[in-house]
Image (spheres, grey):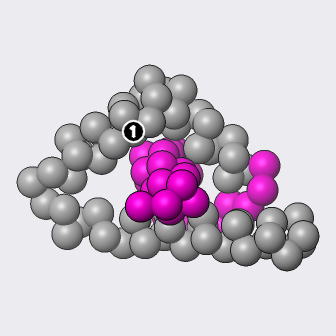
Amino acid sequence: MTAREMTRTVRAEALFVSALSGTSRPRGRELADAIQQAIQRYGGVSGCVAEVAYAYGDHPEAAVVRMRWACRCIDQDAAMSWNGAQ
């Protein structure tokens, strides 16, 4: 896994456990704030990962929709940043 992929994964895990609705479309500062708040709330990245495992460990299929949403938000924000659209 490359550093870029690792960063994407870490950000998606944190966004996954954030308080944002899975129907929202956070960008820029809103996205960064949600990720930072989740990391602080769960005591770091490993805490975010543990929360995902705790909440969905018995039924990981239930997490698919939210993780797709989180990854899509991260990817779209990265694309906008890359293009200078923010």
Q: In the image, is 66 to the left or to the right of 80?
A: left
Q: In the picture, which quadrant includes the C terminus?
A: bottom right
| Rendered location of residue 58, percent (x, y) | 9, 54
Above or below for 36 versus 27: above
Say which residue appears at 54% left-offset and 55% top-offset: 3
Under mark 1, the amino acid is: Cys
Q: Secondary structure at mark 1?
A: helix
| Rendered location of residue 24, percent (x, y) | 61, 65
Q: Residues within 10 Å of mark 1 (few under 14, many from 20)?
A: many
Quick check: can you spot residue 15? no
Quick check: can you spot residue 46? yes
Highlighted range, magenta: 1-29
Say which residue appears at 59% left-offset and 44% top-offset: 35
Say which residue appears at 41% left-offset and 61% top-offset: 1
Q: In the image, is 86 to the left or to the right of 24?
A: right
Q: Nearer the viewer, residue 48 or 1?
A: 1
Q: In the image, is 19 to the left or to the right of 63?
A: right
Q: Which residue is mark 1?
A: 48
| Rendered location of residue 40, percent (x, y) | 53, 26
Residue 79 is inside the magenta segment = no
